[in-house]
Amino acid sequence: MTPIRIAIVGVGKIARDQHVPTIARDAGFELVATASRHGSVEGVPGFPDIETLLDSVGKLDAVALCMPPGPRHAAALKALSAGKHVLLEKPPGATLSELDDLVAAATASKVSLFATWHSRHAAGVAAAKDWLAHRSIRSMRVDWKEDVRRWHPGQAWIWEPGGFGVFDPGINALSIVTEILPMPIYLTSATLLFPKNRAQPIAADLTFADAAGADRVTATFDWRQTGPQTWDIRVATDEGELLLQSGGAKLFIKGEAVVNEGDVEYAGVYRRFAGLIAAGKSDVDLRPLRHVADAFMAGRHDFTDAFED
């Protein structure tokens, strides 16, 4: 089978840590080019921007957009209009409206658009979803706490409008929550904590209710945690507790270990992308992004001490 010829646009930390090695291990893809203002991949032709890339690379099937969400809409439109399948790193865009625009463009060009939520492909997520589908859920508690200096060193864009702040990792938790819960939820309250010198929050507390109006889900996101990092989702049910740890890589049900398989997320992302392309379909689930937008719109905005890298 001929591999899908793909280019990476935005050669930064996430591209180097995840996309480049995952593509190298996947026989279904071939990395044929990159476009980036500052980064490159050894042995792969590099271009300064997506316009030059699209003009210069004749045999190209798809692009993976790994730049910050702010400029991603314009780049995605160019790629879709050129007839290329498009993979969007999370969060897929800076606004909900621009994603509607991209869906329409993908449909018009008859290509696949994939808004990725890499945490949904963590090893324990599918099994957690299956188990919860047959249980009555009493409550869910999300704790997503990490050290921004460790995971986003010197990335000033993440503190600017459209950068999402603590919701950049927090949306990973919301992508799992919306995947494994058998019922929809909606935001009932939120408090966002902003450093006084930053435009995006460093911490957030959220509460969600189910369709019956009962508060079922609480979440705490915090970028100030040093030492061990915390990415846990704990669900109380009528038949005992389910616990996802390490961002979904580990699954415990009623205290017993069920899954512990390490980092498999991006392998799942690219398998899904290949399947969408083969089927001529798109996958653009905006529920995690909608919850973040609701938190910014309806949440209380408080302030704390200035933050410096």
Image (cartoon, rainbow, N blue to C red):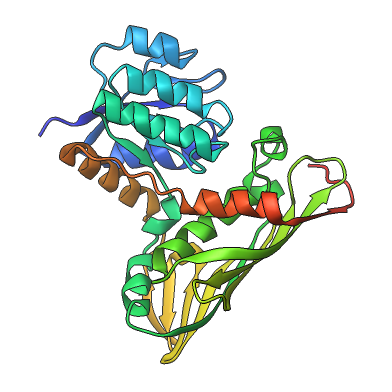
Residue 71 in the image: above or below residue 88: above
Residue furthest toward the bottom?
239
In what quadrant of the picture does the N terminus appear?
Answer: top left
- The residue lying at 68 percent from left, 49 percent from top is 297
41 above or below 278? above
**From this viewpoint, is residue 10 visible?**
no
Residue 151, given in percent of the width and then of the height, sits at 62, 47
Please state the total of marks drawn on the protein image: 0
Q: In the rendered image, which quarter is residue 13 located in?
A: top right
Judging depth in this view, the residue of 205 and 37 nearest the camera is: 205
Q: Is residue 72 visible?
A: yes
Query: Which of the 4 quarters of the picture holds residue 193?
Result: bottom right
Which residue occupies 42% across, 51% down?
118
The quadrant holding residue 189 is bottom right
- Residue 302: % across, % down: 84, 55
Residue 222 appears at what percent x and percent y?
A: 70, 59
**Dividing the image into 4 quarters, which one contains the C terminus?**
top right
The spot of residue 172 in percent (x, y) is 52, 55
Left or right position of 5 against 125? left
Q: What residue is rendered at 40% in x and 62% in y?
A: 179
Give the left or right position of residue 197, taking residue 280 as reference. Answer: right
Residue 207 as seen in the image, left or right of residue 125 = right
Q: What residue is shown at x 52% (from left), y 43% (from top)?
A: 91
**Residue at the extreme front of the image, as rendered:** 212
303 to 205, vertically: above or below = above
Q: Is residue 161 above or below residue 272?
A: above
Q: On the picture, is 200 further left or further right than 64?
A: right
